[in-house]
Amino acid sequence: MEEKKFDLNTVIGFVLIFGIFAWMFWVNKPTAEEIEAQKAEQEQVEAEEKAEDNKTAEFVEQSKAIVVNPQDSLAAVAAKSQLGAFAYSASLPSAKENITKIENEVLSLKINNRGGYIEEALLKNFKTYDSVPLYLIKDGKNASFNLNFGTTDNRILNTKDLFFEPTVSKNGENTVLSMKLKVSDSKFLEYRYELKPNEYMLDFSIRSQGLQQVFNTSQVVNLDWKLQAIRQAKSASYENRYTDIHYEYEGDKDDFTGQGDFDEDKEEQVNWVGFKQHFFTSILLTDTPFKTATLASKNIANSSELDDKDITVTKEFAASLPLELQGGELNYNMNWYYGPTDYKILSSYDRNLDEIVPLGWGIFGIINRYIFIPFFAFLSGFLPYGIAIVVMTIVVRIVLSPVTYKSYVSQAKMKILKPEIAEITEKYKDNAMKKQQETMALYSKAGASPMSGCLPALMQIPVFYALFNFFPSAFDLRQKSFLWADDLSSYDTIAKLPFEIPFYGDHISLFPILASIAIFIYMMMTTGQTMQQQQPGMPNMKFIMYLSPLMMLVFFNNYASGLSLYYFISNLITIGIMLVIKNVIIDEDKIHAKIQENKKKPKKQGKFQKRMKELMDQAEQQKTKKK
């Protein structure tokens, strides 16, 4: 039964890969000295950050003292000493902590006078896993946006410490907010936000006017953007697997940093940077590519701590983006996106943002984009989401049923030939080459091939892997219930454990259990009837047969229930199709008679087969001569 060989080899491959990775992690684990060095380095970084925070706090306090009485001549002198040309901004009524709010039907933003950046981003139509409002930025505590620049009078200033003057206006139906950091009434640095109705994407520009004599052109204007990803999902560890930095560079190339800690990756000509969470993303886009981008990602908590209820943020992102002065001025047209990691929405902007959704590379992504996403959207347009998954699974299995049929016919042929193969094995047990030669001759005469069972199974791999990527990335499944699962994008729970089991979790999910049972039955059907006696030095096939459903049971306990539902239904349907093929469609007696008839017919050999036979005969003759 050749499908068995493919399935077992695949499982063995996964086990070997896992073992290799485990060995690599063990060999490359840090020594005690390296751990101490890392600890010392971390303490130094924390000390530097604390010193910088203290310096910023001192600067802000001085600024506040200056703006208490801007008519005071001493305060004016202090402002001039502290802020240089931007002392004018400290004399305006807007030089105080104040919030300007702009919103549309889907997005609410709050922008602080100090720094002029978004300190709160609320997605109106969504809730977190525990039914509270969903913020990507909240109270200015988990995000910062800053321009760091030098001035001609040898100062280094940060916009996050300075006060902007807000002005709200309308451009048709759009809401426009202008935030100006002023040197005078006609000279300023401006952040301009324009929010359109029903849009998660807003226009954003950075421009200066009359600051040619203020900016130090020999120094780089650096844009620093930082964000801590707020936990949005029931399983923070599962959410964290899909949380990383994505970016586009050098035209239309795209890449991502991965789920681990990642420091200072420099890319050139970057068009956008996205701080991506599983189902929500913050993206900064520019029409004028950033010359370079330095990116960093850091895990806030280790994997064992992630699902602690007290964990509120999962990762910390940072991007450092240099801005180029043109004629001594800044002029960048940009966009902000605060919204769902939804393929349909992201692809509608025609900015290559759909690459943020992990649909798989190559053929797998193509299958998802052009087949599964449109088909599932069609089904879910008139069916509940759980039923849509079931119907989609049924259709996929029916479409692949001819492949299943060919695979099972191959299995039936190999089963019928099993006694004759055993006879050849016994007859030529001391002559491996002759045994191989006679076995291949038998296959050729019978019209059977060991590969005929593997090839149909290989054809299913693109579909299998595409769906493995599709379900965890399907935004539409978020917080959609089906049967006992209250969220198809997260794990289902039928029992809560009073303790946590490593790799398994602190709960029991039913869909992975059902999927594991279905996989076990399927493997019993496809491997049990042709299970060979274990050979010395070979893996225990029964153990491998049990390992696959066990891995499903353990590792999928924390995966999206929609994915486990698909595997359960898929294997259930496959079992049904195989039973129908075995008991209704295939007649093994007829197959046996056909094989015997084929064996009697003279088999014309191709040039390659003929040449191989000649080589094997020559090798056999040489072996006989040596004896």
Image (spheres, rainbow, N blue to C red):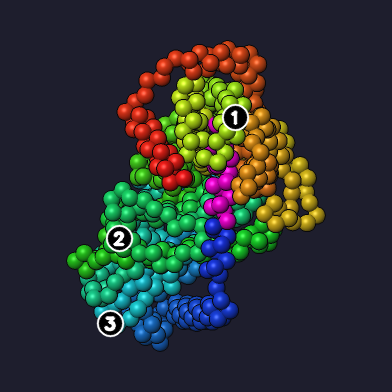
Q: Residues within 10 Å of mark 2 (few under 14, many from 20)?
A: some
Please, which residue is most extreme toward the right here?
A: 498
Residue 310, how many percent across, how many down?
68, 61
- What amino acid type should be assigned to the residue bearing mark 3? Asp
Left or right relative to 600: residue 178 = left
Position above or below: 107 against 184: above
Position above or below: 451 against 556: above
Left or right relative to 267: residue 460 = right
Q: Main secondary structure of the magenta part?
A: helix
Mark 3 vs mark 2: in front: 2
Residue topped by disc 2? 268
Q: Secondary structure at mark 1?
A: helix
Residue 207 visible? The answer is: no
Q: Earlier in the sequence, mark 3 or mark 2?
A: 3
Residue span colored magenta: 2-19
- What amino acid type should be assigned to the residue bearing mark 1? Glu
Q: Secondary structure at mark 2?
A: strand
Residue topped by disc 1? 423
Residue 252, how many percent across, how many down?
31, 48
Is residue 583 or residue 197 the one in the foreground?
583
